[in-house]
Structures are given as C-alpha cells and as structure tokens.
Image (tube, helix red, strand yellow):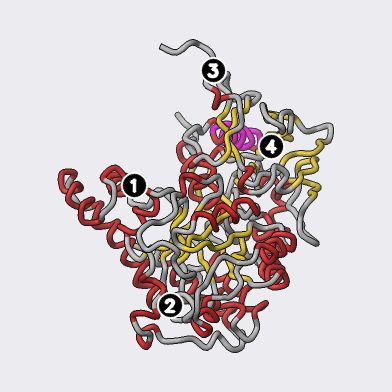
Amino acid sequence: MTAAPPTIGVLALQGDVREHARALESAGAKVITVRRPGELERVDGLVLPGGESTTMWRLARTFDLLEPLRKRVEGGMPAYGSCAGMIMLADRIRGGVAGQETVGGIDMTVRRNAFGRQVDSFECAVPLTGMGEEPYRAVFIRAPWVESVGEGVEVLGRAEGGRNAGRIVAVRQGRLMATSFHPELTGDHRVHRYFADLVRRAMTEED
Amino acid sequence: MSTSSPAPENTAPETGTARVKRGMAEMLKGGVIMDVVTPDQAKIAEDAGAVAVMALERVPADIRVEGGISRMSDPDMIDGVIEAVSIPVMAKARIGHFVEAQVLQALGVDYIDESEVLTPADYDNHIDKWAFTVPFVCGAVNLGEALRRITEGAAMIRSKGEAGTGDVSNATTHMRRIRQEIRRLQNLAEDELYVAAKELQAPYELVKEVAASGKLPVVLFTAGGIATPADAAMMMQLGAEGVFVGSGIFKSGNPEQRAEAIVKATTFHDDPDVIAKVSRGLGEAMVGINVASLGEDQKFAHRGW
C-alpha cells in the first residue's frame, strides 16, 4: 500500500511557479499554488520559486502572507527556496532594498545579486551532497550566494571553476533547504525529489 | 571517438547560454515591467513592486507627440537608472541597430528590447541576437513574427499592442491572435505542419515544437496600451505571462499608487475582488488615444516584420 502523495505548495506571488510545479509533480507530489493564507494551511511543504525577491516580499507583506509563512516555517513545515526563494528563507540578507524582510528560517547570510548582473549569469557543474554521483548542471541567474552559515546548517554544494569557485550555493538546515541556482529550469529533478522525500519523511514523523 | 576527458562545458562556467537567457525571462513571470525616464521614477517603480524597469528617454506617449527619430537612450541616463535600483534594468535598441545593442550590453543592462517604439535602423534585418551575451525581448503581432524573432535569438516575446495610446485593444488583438494560432497548430495533423510553417514564414522545427508543447519556447508578455489594473488582469487572463507598462504609469495622475495597483492586479489577475479594491481612487488614468483614430503611418506595431 502506498501512502497518499504529499501536497506541496508553490508560492505563486511572482516568479517561475509553473517550472517548480512541473518538477514537483514529476517527483510524485500533488501541487497547489499558494497566494493566500488559506492555501498555505493546506500544504505539507512549500517551494519558494525563483523571481524577484523584492516583489515577492512586498506582495507577501501587503496580502498578509508574511506572518503566516513565518509561523508555518517555525512550526516545522518543510520548505525549499531557489534563488529569490533562497533569499526569502535566509535569516539575514545583504544587498537588499531598504527595509526588505524575509520569511527566514535558515541561519545564514545571503547576498542578493552576488554573482553580478544578467551578463554574468551562467551555468556550471555543481556536485550536490546526497543527490547522486553526477554533478548537477546548475543555472545561475542574477543569483545570490550564501556568505556565511550558522552551526546547524549543512552545506550541500559549492560553485566550481571560475572566479566564483568555492562559493556556497546549496544548503540545508533540518527541514529547510535552499539553492542559489534553478534546478526547475533543467530536466534534472533530483533536487525536487530530494525535497519531496524530505516532505514525506516529515509527514511520517508527525503521524 | 573522443577521449575520456570531460567536456569543457562541464568544468568552466558558461555565460549567455539559451537556458540562462530564457531563464531570466522565466524569473520575471507574473510581474510588471515599467517604463521609466529618470532614476527617481525607477525608484518609484521598484518601491511599487516592479520586477524590472525599462530605462528610456521618452515614454511612447511623448514619442508620439514629439515625433522625430527615436533612438537608444543616453548611456548616462541608463547608468543613472542602474545605480538607482537593484532590480533588473532593461533598455531599448532600434530594430536592426546592432551597435546600439552592443553599447547597451557594454553598459551592463540585463535585457535589451529590440523595439518598434524606436525608429527602425534597418528595414530588412533584425539584430542577430545569438551574437550577444545579454538576452533580448522582441515584439510580435502574430505567431509567425514571434517565431521569426525566436529564430534570430530572442529569449522573450511581448505582444506589441499599440504603445503610447493607453488603448488596450491592440494588445488584446495580438495576444488573442498568438494564442489562437498556437491552438490551431495543436489541432493540425503532423503532415500539415510543413505548410503551416510555410504560411507562418517560420522554421519547421520551431513550428513542430510549438504544436507539440502548446506554447512558445520562450516567455510571452504583453505590452502596448495597458493603463489600468483591469487592463493588466485581462491580458493575464488572456494568457500573458507578465505585463509591460509603458506610458500608463508615469503619464497618470498618481504614479505611485497606480504602479502598485497594477502589480497587485497582475498577481491576483483572476480575483475580481482584489482588482476592484486596487482600482479604487487611482485618480486620472493617462489621457490616451483611440487606436482607430491613428493613421496607418502613425502605428508602431507595423514596424518589424
């Protein structure tokens, strides 16, 4: 007998929602979009997509979603953020706009637009801990990097090659994870499978 | 047979790939890109929740009034906007003017709009956009035009509408037409796609891809005449993945509030209660010109082919 698939939400205020939804579906999840507190209540886990973090923050604030998001993350809901989503899950950010707030949850400092402007956006191989032998073909778009992490944060991946070699680009702290890059833009769904498994385990633990 | 050493692309970071260029547009989805002519306006746009700004010297409504030749903006002006905000900055080059595009890339803009709003520099050829690291967005009035731009390397498409009018009717027409032509392709038999490609004047491989996926291979935004939150929401319901607002914001009575309202209406485009709420008390919309009253020679949408 197989358990019911987890319901995973994609925060749909702005950004590449559809790509995440597709990747999560292929990882066996039931996917809903989340723009309102009522929708947030129904999910077992949440993906915060790529997009513009300042836009997401302003809309989350205006439509009373920021506090509910913080409450659910504090309450142990698994969450995964890519790019702008990584910024949203960071406890501390640099290079944000005046007053920019985050949901927080991961004890890290993230620098916004750290890799530069769009002409500096790039693809490269990133080996990821716990996601197989083959390095990940990672797509970085005006991407942030993780400047520092607290003790409880596991570094899952670092940039390789070029002037940015060694920069932290994938992390996990308990049920929360984040990547600077966009696995949803490639056909390689290992990151989404990893997250869906994390959600399934969290559901079992709470049963 | 090649040796076992890994391909270079697996070790060295690669910039300017199709995935990086098209991916940038994916990140703008569900958002509003606003025309700005000063750093202060750029700041207002960022504070209102714009996902990007388009830096240009004159908004389309003023280009219409003042006439003459419209060109790429002064690099000082573009630098000023890049300095003022941390969101992506786009800028316009004239159709076919590849040196303006080279300059914009050197300035570090995040996206180039090869735009019919400026006076074309080449009436035969568009810019070879594959030759650039920076991605391009181009306008289209129908599917064939969109696919020709994608063939030339455009990483994002916007329906043209009729810029600088505040009249949404052409944006509606162009978005409906593109979506309708995609639906038509989906219903054709495989052996009918060859003729469809001929009719669309677009490469067969691309036509086949669209027929199979039911969408363009790049992000599709709307532009040209969007002036109100309801305009933006209607275009989203018609299938746009995001919105360009040109003259509609800074030619209106209360730009701050209108900008914010259009951002909210774009996200909640399917929720009339939200659209009603944000539409209240916005003050004067831009004055506007009925597209039907424009002479054919005054229409920007005819530029590009």
- Using the rendered image of the protein, determine whether residue B89 is visible from the camera's viewpoint: yes
Binning the other alpha carbons within 10 Å of mark 1 as few (below 14), some (14 to 19) or many (20 upward) gives few
The tag earlier along the polypeptide, 3 or 1, is 3
> Looking at the picture, which amino acid does disc 3 mark?
Pro
At 72% across and 64% down in the image, what residue appears?
A: B80
Q: Is there one chain holding both mark 1 and mark 2?
A: yes
Q: Secondary structure at mark 1?
A: helix
Q: Are marks 3 and 1 in contact (CB under 8 Å)?
A: no
Q: Which residue is mark 3?
A: B6
Mark drawn on residue B213 = 1
**In the picture shown, does residue B248 fall above or below A32?**
below
Binning the other alpha carbons within 10 Å of mark 3 as few (below 14), some (14 to 19) or many (20 upward) gives few
In the figure, residue B33 lies in which quadrant?
bottom right
Start-end of magenta stretch: A193-205
Q: Secondary structure at mark 4?
A: loop
Q: Pinpoint residue B238: horizontal percent, then vertical percent.
A: 39, 67
Closer to us: mark 2 or mark 3? 3
Q: Pinpoint residue A61: horizontal percent, then vertical percent.
A: 70, 64
> Looking at the picture, which amino acid does disc 4 mark?
Arg
Q: Which residue is mark 2?
A: B168
The tag earlier along the polypeptide, 2 or 3, is 3
